[in-house]
Amino acid sequence: MFFKKNPKEKLQKEMVKKLEEARNWQRQGNIIQYAELMTEAEEIGKKIDALSNQTLGR
């Protein structure tokens, strides 16, 4: 009855959170913090792509 969390879903939620934080920093005018969070979100996106490719390759 207990299901293992899908690591891809976890990363997607984390990415959405980073993107929302980045948007908020951008609206406040803090472009440096915005850029840092966007970079982190990009890295998470790459991990999601790698997981997707890994599951397709099986």
Image (spheres, rainbow, N blue to C red):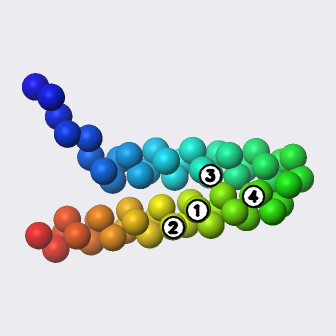
Is label 2 in contact with label 1 (beta carbons under 8 Å)? yes
Residue 57 placement, left or right of 49: left
Residue 40 bears which disc, if any? 1
How crowded pointer 3 is (Cα within 10 Å; few <14, some 14-19, many 20+) is rated as: some
For this view, does 17 lie left or right of residue 55?
right
Residue under numbered circle 2: 43
For this view, does 44 lie left or right of residue 51?
A: right
Mark 4 residue type: Tyr
Number of residues whose C-alpha sits closer than 10 Å to that of mark 2, classed few (under 14), some (14–19) or many (20 or more): few
C-alpha separation, residue under disc 3 versus residue under disc 2: 12 Å
> Which label was assigned to residue 27?
none
Label 3 or label 1, whichever comes before in sequence order: 3
Residue 18: percent from left, percent from top: 60, 50
Label 3 vs label 1: CA separation? 9 Å
Real-space CA distance between mark 2 and mark 4, rounded to the nearest whole angstrom: 14 Å
Q: Secondary structure at mark 4?
A: helix
